[in-house]
Image (tube, rainbow, N blue to C red):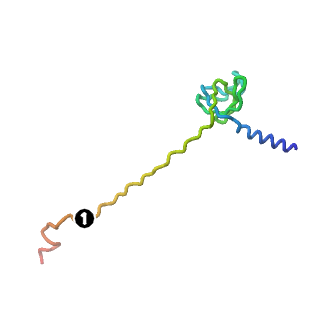
Amino acid sequence: MRHFLIAAGLCAGVAAPCYAEPAITTAPAAMRRAPNAHSHVVQTVPANAQIDLETCSAGWCSASWRNLFGYIPAFAVADAGPPMIASPPPPVVVAAPPIVVAPAFQWGGPYVGGGFGYGWGRW
């Protein structure tokens, strides 16, 4: 029974980040280690950044951004709705290279000259 409880706790601990909801910051905010204004700053989150929101209470939201976890003031967070789905990239169109063929030799007209070959006048 004890092993079952330990395994269940590990599964819940691993699956807990999967329950995060997507959200967007409405203003630049400092992510702090604890939910108070005097706590250590973990990182600064810019406006319009997509964050993973876990819970909100007492004016602070527990969230993660770029694999760092902390607390962001609730006034700087807005619900993002469903996750954005990236559109597929446009198809790659490769044009065939032009085929360049050397011109074939063509006869330009009648022969105009003084004879019919080497030594024609010395028969």
> Residue reaching furthest bottom?
123
Instruction: Decide which of 7, 70 is in the foreground and name it.
Output: 7
Q: How many marks?
A: 1
Residue at the location (84% across, 44% down)? 4
> Residue reaching furthest front?
81
Instruction: Decide which of 46, 89 is in the foreground and name it.
Output: 89
Which quarter of the figure has residue 21?
Answer: top right
Residue at the location (69% across, 35% down)? 20
Position in image of residue 52 (x %, y %): 66, 34
Which quarter of the figure has residue 42?
Answer: top right
Residue at the location (57% across, 41% down)? 86
Position in image of residue 66 (x %, y %): 64, 35
100 versus 12 height, above or below? below
Position in image of residue 110 (x %, y %): 17, 67
For the C terminus, the image quarter is: bottom left
> Local crowd at mark 1 within 10 Å, few (<14), some, or many (≥20)?
few
For the N terminus, the image quarter is: top right
